[in-house]
Image (cartoon, rainbow, N blue to C red):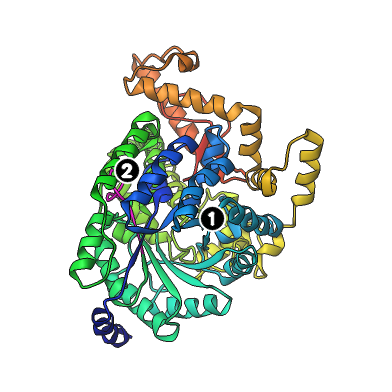
């Protein structure tokens, strides 16, 4: 297979192939923290991105970006239209991230809502939809290809890249054939953890191009474990067309390579690449930093700015490290409380982190080797973390898996790429669960008529091109809280508390959200109470309920410095 790749190198060097760049402005933010810029901030940055002169594409929306707009009390439809419009006028293609069966949330979406999404997003100015499924199940992708094309969008079918005994070059080459046969106009290699090996990626691209030279191939890779720059060069040499890049101050770390480095590397290698207007780059850099300073930085974990080779083995995506570390901190206290009771040595946070990575690596193939991308990366990480907690309690592994995890195991999200371990199958039988092998979409009936009826009863406008109807049906809970004003109140309270904790002056309009700071524990009895709260938090996390929008709701427990009512899965 590598002979195919080697035969391609001289061809693309000699023809001075052009490589295009896409600025993944949406994913830059969501791989760094929780929120994305507001509509007014997007309106400021768009013309400057255009002035940089080096981008043929920009990722403008999709993923969790529209959900988090609702979470901070803003209308995502207005944000998408505002951000897309300047690029549409400049002839720069816009693209969005789309989770296939899960569309723009963490759990399956009825077919009528998925179909409406493409009509709405095309009307709002989005040109290309990047359709992926964490299980790489074509049944979850091909219907979206058809609906997107019918709505006037370009359907970019996506292969989630990972590295395992199941996920070989041949596996991906065969998958690409199925997706192209299903109508895909473009193929994306989504290397969400950045663990795809460069040579293997080149082999995959060369094989696709050999059979389908006119299919555009776009590569998306995160920098966390350090392979991505080499991977981009290999993909370009093998015939790739578009590379996803970032820019300072949100490039590198666990995010994406910077356009400056990739442009210079490819230019030296003989490829045709657009020049970068560095004056505009520095202006965009400054504007982006101002957005961080304004409010977005309060949700950015500094550790996301660091690369780590620890991700090579476990394969977890860099974009979820922020939420992983938040979970780990709470569980750390709970596990140590259990160890102290048994008279055993406590673990440092780093020791527990290494144990977690090792446990993910161990159980991943046992659970059918799903690609570790939203939402399956969260499921596997949660199962690993709960196994560590269960052991500290003297319990067996896999005794604390939530319904969402079981849904994946039982086939309700699609076909797993690998085989389940015998003990997992036996555990399912013990619980009386049945495995599902039919098309997962059949499990989720159409819902738009009931949402149309309710909007009419509430007097809510369905919006331009039915965009408000779509948002309501896609993010039911968050949309209701946005409409009621609860979302804005919750966001303002969270922002005020984070500003206060960071030692920043809290604006007058936010001070009313601040409560009297809690006093630190003054004695061992109080400290013990905190330990018990940690244990309670861990138990509630294990037994949490999965909301429609992918948020685990935790029952109320004693407030501490680290617990929250909602644990948002990034």
Instruction: Tell me the number on the disc at residue 284.
Output: 2
Judged from this view, the residue extending furthest toward the left is: 268
* Position above or below: 362 against 186: above
Q: Position of residue 272 (x, y in %)?
A: 27, 70
In this picture, which residue range is highlighted in magenta? Answer: 243-253
Instruction: Determine the CA span between mark 2 and mark 1.
Output: 22 Å
Q: SS class of the residue under badge 2?
A: helix
Label placed on residue 81 = none
> Seen in the image, is 445 located left or right of residue 429?
right
Cβ atoms at labels 2 and 1 below 8 Å apart: no
Work out whether residue 321 can be spotted: no
Q: Position of residue 394 (x, y in %)?
A: 44, 45
**Is 547 part of what is drawn in magenta?**
no
Q: Within 10 Å of the Cα at label 1, are there few (<14), some (14-19), or many (20+) other Cα atoms?
A: many
| Crowdedness near tag 2: few (<14), some (14–19) or many (≥20) residues, C-alpha within 10 Å | many
- Please, what is the dominant secondary structure of the magenta stretch? loop
Q: Position of residue 251 (x, y in %)?
A: 29, 49
Instruction: From the viewer's side, name the closer residue of 330 and 100.
Output: 100
Residue drawn at the location 66% of the way across and 42% of the way down: 476
Q: Which residue is mark 1?
A: 126
């Amino acid at each position: 297979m590598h002979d195919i790749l080697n035969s391609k190198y001289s061809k693309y060097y000699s023809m001075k192939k052009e490589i295009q760049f896409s600025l993944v402005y949406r994913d830059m933010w969501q791989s760094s923290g929780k929120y994305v810029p507001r509509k007014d901030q997007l309106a400021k940055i768009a013309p400057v991105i255009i002035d940089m002169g080096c981008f043929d594409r920009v990722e403008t929306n999709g993923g969790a970006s529209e959900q988090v707009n609702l979470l901070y009390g803003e209308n995502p439809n207005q944000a998408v239209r505002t951000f897309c419009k300047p690029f549409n006028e400049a002839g720069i293609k816009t693209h969005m991230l789309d989770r296939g069966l899960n569309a723009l949330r963490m759990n399956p979406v009825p077919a009528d809502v998925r179909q409406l999404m493409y009509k709405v997003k095309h009307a709002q100015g989005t040109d290309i939809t990047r359709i992926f499924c964490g299980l790489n199940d074509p049944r979850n992708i091909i219907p979206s290809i058809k609906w997107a094309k019918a709505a006037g969008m370009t359907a970019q079918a996506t292969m989630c890249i990972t590295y395992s005994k199941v996920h070989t070059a041949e596996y991906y080459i065969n998958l690409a054939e199925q997706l192209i046969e299903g109508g895909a106009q473009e193929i994306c290699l989504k290397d969400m953890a950045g663990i795809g090996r460069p040579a293997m990626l080149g082999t995959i691209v060369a094989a696709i191009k050999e059979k389908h030279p006119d299919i555009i191939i776009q590569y998306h890779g995160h920098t966390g474990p350090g392979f991505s720059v080499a991977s981009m060069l290999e993909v370009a040499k093998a015939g790739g067309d578009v590379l996803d890049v970032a820019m300072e101050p949100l490039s590198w770390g666990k995010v994406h390579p910077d356009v400056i480095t990739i442009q210079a590397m490819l230019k030296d290698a003989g490829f045709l690449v657009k020049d970068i207007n560095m004056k505009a780059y520095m202006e965009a850099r400054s504007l982006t930093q101002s957005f961080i300073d304004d409010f977005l930085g309060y949700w950015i974990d500094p550790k996301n700015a660091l690369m780590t080779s620890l991700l090579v083995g476990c394969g977890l995506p860099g974009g979820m490290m922020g939420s992983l570390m938040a979970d780990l901190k709470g569980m750390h206290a709970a596990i140590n409380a259990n160890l102290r009771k048994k008279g055993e040595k406590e673990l440092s946070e780093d020791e527990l982190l290494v144990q977690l990575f090792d446990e993910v690596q161990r159980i991943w193939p046992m659970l059918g080797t799903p690609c570790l991308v939203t939402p399956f990366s969260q499921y596997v990480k949660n199962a690993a973390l709960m196994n560590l907690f269960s052991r500290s309690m003297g319990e067996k592994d896999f005794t604390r898996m939530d319904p969402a995890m079981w849904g994946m195991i039982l086939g309700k999200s699609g076909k797993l790429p690998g085989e389940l371990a015998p003990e997992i199958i036996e555990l399912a039988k013990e619980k009386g669960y049945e495995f599902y092998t039919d098309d997962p979409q059949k499990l989720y009936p159409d819902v738009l008529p009931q949402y149309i009826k309710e909007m009419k009863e509430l007097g809510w406008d369905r919006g331009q091109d039915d965009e408000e109807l779509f948002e309501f049906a896609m993010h039911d809970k968050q949309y209701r809280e946005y409409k009621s004003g609860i979302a804005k109140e919750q966001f303002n309270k969270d922002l005020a508390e984070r500003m206060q904790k960071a030692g920043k002056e809290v604006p007058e309009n936010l001070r009313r959200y601040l409560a009297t700071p809690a006093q630190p524990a003054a004695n061992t009895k109080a400290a013990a109470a905190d330990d018990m709260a940690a244990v309670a938090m861990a138990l509630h996390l294990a037994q949490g309920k999965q909301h429609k929008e992918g948020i685990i709701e935790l029952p109320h427990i004693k407030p501490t410095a680290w617990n929250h009512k909602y644990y948002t899965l990034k």
